[in-house]
Image (cartoon, rainbow, N blue to C red):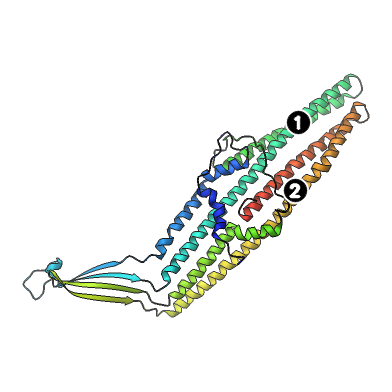
Amino acid sequence: MRGVIPAQAVALVLALGMAPPVLAQEGELGKTVESLLDYAKARNPEYAAMRLETEAARERVYPAGALPDPVLRTELQNVTNFGSDASPNLLPSRVGSTKYTLMQPLPFWGKRDLKREVAEAEAEVAQGKAGVTWTEQAARIKTAYAQYFAVARLIRLTKEVIDLIDRLEGISQVRYANGLVPQQDAIRAQVERTAMRSELIQMETEHHHARSRLNALLSRPAQSPLADPERLRPIPSAAKLDFVVLEDRLRNKNPQLFADEARIRAAEKNRDLTYRNRYPDFVVGVSPVQMRNRVNEWMLMLEFNIPLQQESRRSQEREAEKMIDVTRARKELSANQLLADLSENLAGADAARHIEMLTQTSLLPQAELTFRAALASYETGKVDFATLLDAERQVLKAKQDIVKAQAEQQARLADIERLIGEDI
């Protein structure tokens, strides 16, 4: 059935988390997003707490289906020794008689299995919650790393532009010295360089903030060093980002839907258990009776409760049925919201991919061609310095747009992988 989510699905989400991962060396931490994810799997306290909760929930499965402890009762009869010359006593061999009763409660047939199955479903709910915790944490780390990478690349671009402006200023000063251009050109180059340095300071501040955000996600002090980012993850092909394909993966492997399905199973088993409460539970017992130093009698005991409060039980049964409807409705709501988020992120990733492609293949080459033409024209006095600077800004903007589009694709990919519960 399509809506049923196998336990192996969430096991894939938790597999690396359950085993101690290989930690990246401190000097390598930050070069790739994989190094950050490995570090987080071992160090993130929230994820560790959820894994421990899952293990604790599994430990509740066996006790839920176990028999209750037996009860031993001892009854001393005629402790005053009425009718004899003996004085009152509390020793079993010195009273009228002593009755030992060993009793074992026995739930009605099937109740123990149902209780165990409820506990198993609740353990799967905890497992699903742990999966949700990790997928959300991994998505935040992936997105923060993409921003960290983008800011680092923008800083590099800005420094390259500052070097270029220095060269343009040198050209303008030479032409000014030869009386070919006004002094305003050299001054404008200095103004442009100052503006770019101001922008560089803002980017370096953002770089600091991005590093602090990553350290916070890794549960490290905000000022801890991170290596310079080296590369982004490759973006999957358009065929792998097909909505129909990813919809099936989302329904089968999303940890939130896995937890919701486990809640439905727990509610169904609770419903079945509630119906079983129409039948009595039993207590069986055996009682040897000691008189003085000998056991003279053996007694057998059978006890059961009488389920007379039928109206109360019918209310409990109706409640159990309603809870099944509630859990099913919540799963449907979650599925619809997750699919809507998937569609939105796929569209966003596709738009960013087209922007990057258009800028890389069309806009950037055109801007670079325009700048080279403007530079050659400026050197021959055909255009003014303002035109040259405007052409240089177009090249910078195109390169910045490419970096931002790449970061946007990475953020969208991180959200898509969060939704489907695994890497693509």
The residue type indicated by label 2 comes to Ala
Q: Position of residue 290 (x, y in %)?
A: 16, 71
Q: Is residue 299 left or right of residue 325?
A: left
Residue 204: quadrant of the picture = top right
Query: Which type of secondary structure does the marked residue at label 1 adopt?
Result: helix
* In the rendered image, the vertical position of residue 14 relative to residue 222, given as above or below: below
Q: Quarter of the image for the N terminus: give it.
A: bottom right
Residue 73: quadrant of the picture = bottom left
Q: Position of residue 322 (x, y in %)?
A: 54, 72
Q: From mark 2 to mark 1, how far is it between C-alphas?
A: 25 Å
Picture residue at 73% right of the left edge, 43% below the top: 404
Residue 108: quadrant of the picture = bottom left
Mark 2 or mark 1: which comes first in sequence?
A: 1
Label drawn at residue 349: none
What residue is shown with label 2? 352
* In the rendered image, the vertical position of residue 385 relative to residue 138, given as above or below: above
Contact? badges 2 and 1 (CB < 8 Å): no
Q: Position of residue 14 (x, y in %)?
A: 54, 52
The residue type indicated by label 1 comes to Glu
Instruction: Compare residues 379 and 353 and report the one nearer the observer.
Output: 353
User: Most extreme residue toward the left, as rendered?
Assistant: 85
Instruction: Compare residues 192 and 6 and report the one nearer the observer.
Output: 6
Q: Is residue 390 visible?
A: no
What residue is shown with label 1? 160
How would you rate the neighbour count of disc 2 (Cα within 10 Å): few for under 14, some for 14-19, many for 20 or more? many
How would you rate the neighbour count of disc 1 (Cα within 10 Å): few for under 14, some for 14-19, many for 20 or more? few
Q: Position of residue 119 (x, y in %)?
A: 46, 63
Query: Which type of secondary structure does the marked residue at label 2 adopt?
Result: helix
